[in-house]
Amino acid sequence: MLTYVSRFLGDNIPGLESQIYEEYIRLSKQISLLVITEEISTGQLYKNLSLVKVPRVAIPKIRGLFKIFGYSLATIKHRNNYDLAYVRTFSPPELIAGIIAKKILKKPLILLIPGSWMFVGNSFKTRIFRSIYHKAIISANTIIVYSKLITSEIEDLVGKIDQSKIVIIKNAVDTARFKPNSSQKNNTIL
């Protein structure tokens, strides 16, 4: 399986990339995983995990274009090393590379869509992003969302989605890492 993350830095950094890193390590215990990334700082090797580093340009105005080019080129170059593409986040470079994997390379595409807030608005940039987002959704074989509400939110932006593509996987908590404090009262949210 092919996937993407901007930085593959280990689990000692705050934020989503640390969570994605842990997810990819666990996933690589089950399947062979190829990760395309701009930055690698972990020297640790994993049996079923391969990392491909693409060049990173620090100039903000052209960074996104270079990332699109790097991710897309790596997706094409390594096409014989994976059987499907999994887009875990929804940045335009990853979505475009996923679309290329699906449309040009004929690989199945799985999208995880946590929401659509990034694509709300009417600026020129947002309209371009929303167009890419729409093409990825149409191209995807499977779309993973956290709730039915997210599906409705996405459809408000891009139109009707083939419901047979939708898989709902509710957010989970890693109870080995986050343990409830037994001294606190149980607060139920209605």
Image (cartoon, rainbow, N blue to C red):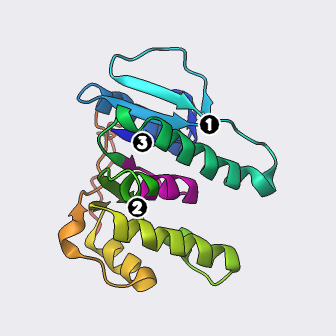
Q: Is residue 64 above or below residue 139?
A: above
Q: Is residue 113 above or below residue 36?
A: below
In front of the other: 120 or 179 = 120
Query: Nearer the N terminus, badge 2 or badge 3?
Result: 3
Under mark 2, the amino acid is Pro
The residue positioned 36% from the left and 34% from the top of the image is: 80
Give me the disc on residue 38.
1
Q: Position of residue 74 (x, y in %)?
A: 53, 39
Label 3: state its secondary structure. Answer: strand
Question: Split into 4 quadrants, where in the image is the C terminus?
Answer: bottom left
Quarter of the image where one finds residue 39: top right
Q: Position of residue 71 (x, y in %)?
A: 56, 45
Give me the disc on residue 114.
2
Label 1 close to label 2 by CB (< 8 Å): no
The residue stretch that appears in magenta: 86-99
Residue that label 3 marks: 3
Query: Nearer the N terminus, badge 1 or badge 2?
Result: 1
